[in-house]
Image: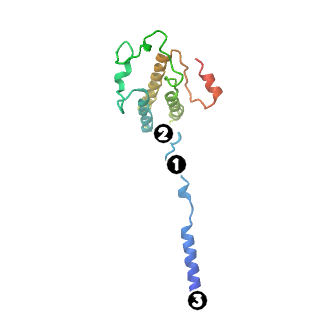
Amino acid sequence: MKLKHIILQTILMAGATWSLTSCNDFLDMAPLDQVTPQEYFNTTDHLAAYSISQYNNIFSTHGGYGVGTVNNDQNTDNMVAGGYSSTYFEKGQWRVPNTGGGWDFTQIRYCNYFFENVLPKFEAGKIEGNCEQILHYVGEMYFIRAWIYYSKLKSFGDFPIITEVLPDNQSVLTEKSVR
């Protein structure tokens, strides 16, 4: 009887050990919060979501505490605003600050990133969806990039045209920032 009890305990322990250990294949998954270009830009829905999201970056919105597009003409010859500063109207006083001031390539980088990932897939026929819609969203991104460059041209005059995603390398960035 004692031997039978030991065998039963051994079988139960082996069964418990076997049931508690298993492979971890279900843990070997790509993170769901990190989408790679290979997984994205494959359907017209992806292209639509990416291109539509860029409009928030280029146009003033009416969200938050701002007044949106109402003040876009402030301190120009189209609109007189209360509490203006005379430095806007004195010759040579309207200067670009050392930081900020619109000298930012973030939105341009977003557009170039789109083109570097979408155009090769489109030429290879790897994007699912209507060809006309794909071309529509590609054209929309060309418009957004052109709009951003036009805004920079209005603000700064001559502005470097960047048509590729640049690496985070000081020498390359210095070379590309030449007007």
Q: Quadrant of the N terminus?
A: bottom right
Query: As shown in the figure, which amino acid type bears the numbered disc 1?
Result: Pro
Q: Looking at the image, is mark 1 or mark 3 earlier in the sequence?
A: 3
Specify few, some or many for label 2: CA neighbours under 10 Å numbering under 14, 14-19, or 20 or more.
Answer: some
Residue 40 coordinates in the image, percent (x, y): 49, 40
Q: CA distance from mark 3 to mark 2?
A: 66 Å
The residue pinned by badge 3 equals 2
Query: As shown in the figure, which amino acid type bears the numbered disc 2?
Result: Asn
Q: Looking at the image, is mark 1 or mark 2 earlier in the sequence?
A: 1
The reply to whether dot 1 and dot 2 touch (C-beta < 8 Å) is: no
Residue 42 numbered mark, or none: 2
Which numbered disc, 1 or 2, marks the residue closer to the eye? 1
Residue ranking furthest to the top = 91
The residue pinned by badge 1 equals 31
The reply to whether dot 3 and dot 2 touch (C-beta < 8 Å) is: no
Q: CA distance from mark 1 to mark 3?
A: 52 Å
Label 1: which secondary element: loop
Label 2: which secondary element: loop
Residue 145 coordinates in the image, percent (x, y): 47, 25
